[in-house]
Image (cartoon, rainbow, N blue to C red):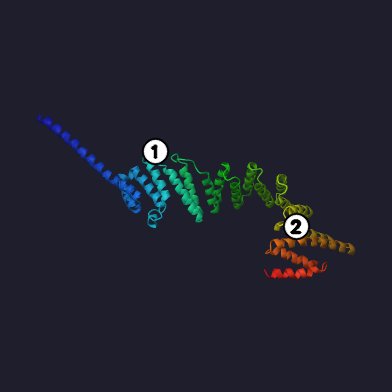
């Protein structure tokens, strides 16, 4: 019986020993997790430096460093550091929002059962983190740190794309990301965001124009033109889209396309003076000055105080007269030559009122004054009063 009792006692002692070891391990882990509990309490109290000290200890302990709660606490601490206005606390973490996101991701990784995911969803943690990224992006954009702003907006998009995120992605963030990239001259990054905005029909035609300008900045005229065509397809009645198409084809010497869109635009808005002006520019490029003059007359009739319209009308008469002088130079008959020069001078005179009007509208403009100087000097023998006007305009030019 003694042997049996001894064996029983040994078994009991071993169990007791195992129990003691288990309790010791548990107490050790609990001690380290107590640092996490303390850190959370210190965060609530606003003593973020002390909270970080407690968490730093928990993050190097082999028991607590693998506990998802440790990283949840770190994420919360980092977000509070971002929100703090205390410079001392700001120094605790150079990139708090990215560190917060990394901490939450680590917590998820350490919790395959899904309790952390549920907790993050219930607490709307990613929604709050996403809003923090928006705030950071806006601050950076205002400070003209456009590359930093882009990273913040992109981080918001990444966070909001998670199935933990409670809510929907704000369409404006794509637009803001595009603007930040555009201002940073990172056009290749800006374009996909503007395309996303056009697909969502966010901000109407504006993303199309920004996408177009980005392509033009990259000297990608092919895609620039396609962008404007997409805009026209979706906004066929928008005059700004039409005018940009006309301007694009004019600049790229695709005059037939430009005329086509101008005629379409005029059919929708016949009293738009700028359309008649644009049409005149096309005729001027083809040196069809009479047709250009007719268009400019209509534009001036609709709105007479536009510098470019008045100036271009003067240019049309001036260039037309120059062509007439060239034709006169080959005439051998003295009488016919004299008549041809007189006819050219009469056209030169027609240019003067338009340059004078342009100079009145834009008083600091030198180009109109220089053209007037040349015309007054050329025609001073035809009309003696131009001598005084020549002297007057010279004074104005010398005074600039």
Identify residue for label 1. 118
Number of other residues with Cα within 10 Å of mark 2, as a class: few under 14, some 14 to 19, many 20 or more: many
The C terminus sits in image quarter: bottom right
Number of other residues with Cα within 10 Å of mark 1, as a class: few under 14, some 14 to 19, many 20 or more: few
Tell me the SS state at disc 2: helix
Is residue 330 in view from this perspective?
no
Query: How far apart, in angstroms, are the residues tagged by discs 1 and 2?
Result: 72 Å
Instruction: Report the residue that reaches farthest toward the top.
Output: 1
Task: Judge whether 371 appears above or below 212 on screen.
Answer: below
Q: Which percent across, then down, holds residue 256?
A: 72, 47
Between discs 1 and 2, the one toward the N terminus: 1
Q: Which percent across, then down, holds residue 168?
A: 49, 41
Residue 38 versus residue 251: which sits nearer the camera? 38
Q: Which mark is residue 26?
A: none
Q: Is residue 149 left or right of residue 43?
A: right
Q: Is residue 19 left or right of residue 331?
A: left
Tell me the SS state at disc 1: helix
Is residue 376 in view from this perspective?
yes
Residue at left offset 57%, top offset 41%: 199
User: Is the Cβ of the residue at disc 1 closer than 8 Å to that at disc 2?
Assistant: no
Residue 345 versus residue 294: which sits nearer the camera? 294
Q: Quadrant of residue 67?
A: top left
Q: Which percent across, then down, holds residue 76?
A: 38, 47
Q: Quadrant of residue 395?
A: bottom right
Q: Which percent across, then down, holds residue 205?
A: 61, 46
Identify residue for label 2. 313
The N terminus sits in image quarter: top left
Residue at left offset 73%, top offset 70%: 394
Residue 293 versus residue 101: which sits nearer the camera? 293
């Amino acid at each position: 019986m003694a042997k049996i009792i001894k064996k029983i006692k040994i078994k009991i002692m071993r169990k007791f020993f195992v129990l003691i070891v288990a309790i010791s391990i548990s107490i050790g882990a609990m001690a380290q997790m107590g640092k996490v509990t303390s850190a959370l309490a210190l965060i609530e109290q606003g003593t973020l430096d002390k909270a970080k000290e407690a968490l730093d200890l928990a993050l190097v302990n082999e028991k607590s460093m693998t506990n998802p709660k440790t990283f949840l606490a770190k994420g919360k601490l980092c977000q509070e550091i971002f929100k703090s206005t205390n410079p001392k606390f700001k120094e605790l973490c150079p990139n708090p929002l990215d560190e917060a996101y990394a901490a939450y991701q680590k917590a998820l990784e350490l919790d395959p059962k899904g309790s952390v995911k549920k907790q993050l969803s219930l607490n709307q943690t990613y929604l709050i983190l996403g809003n923090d990224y928006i705030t950071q992006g806006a601050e950076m954009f205002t400070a003209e740190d456009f590359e930093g702003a882009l990273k913040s907006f992109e981080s918001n998009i990444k966070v909001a794309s998670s199935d933990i995120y409670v809510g929907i992605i704000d369409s404006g963030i794509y637009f803001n990301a595009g603007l930040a990239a555009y201002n940073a001259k990172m056009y290749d990054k800006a374009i996909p965001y503007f395309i996303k905005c056009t697909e969502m029909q966010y901000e109407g035609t504006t993303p199309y124009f920004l996408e177009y300008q980005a392509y033009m900045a990259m000297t990608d005229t092919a895609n620039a033109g396609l962008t404007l065509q997409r805009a026209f397809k979706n906004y066929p009645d928008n005059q700004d889209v039409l005018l940009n198409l006309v301007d694009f084809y004019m600049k790229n010497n695709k005059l037939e396309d430009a005329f086509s869109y101008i005629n379409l635009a005029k059919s929708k808005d016949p009293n738009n003076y700028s359309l008649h002006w644009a049409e005149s520019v096309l005729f001027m490029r083809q040196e069809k000055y009479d047709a250009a003059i007719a268009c400019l007359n209509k534009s001036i009739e609709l709105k007479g105080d536009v510098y470019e319209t008045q100036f271009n009308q003067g240019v049309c008469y001036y260039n037309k007269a120059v062509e007439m002088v060239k034709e006169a130079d080959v005439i051998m008959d003295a009488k016919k030559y004299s008549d041809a020069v007189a006819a050219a001078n009469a056209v030169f005179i027609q240019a003067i009122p338009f340059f004078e009007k342009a100079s009145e509208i834009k008083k600091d403009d030198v180009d109109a004054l220089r053209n007037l100087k040349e015309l007054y000097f050329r025609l001073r023998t035809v009309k003696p009063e131009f001598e005084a006007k020549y002297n007057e305009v010279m004074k104005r030019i010398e005074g600039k």
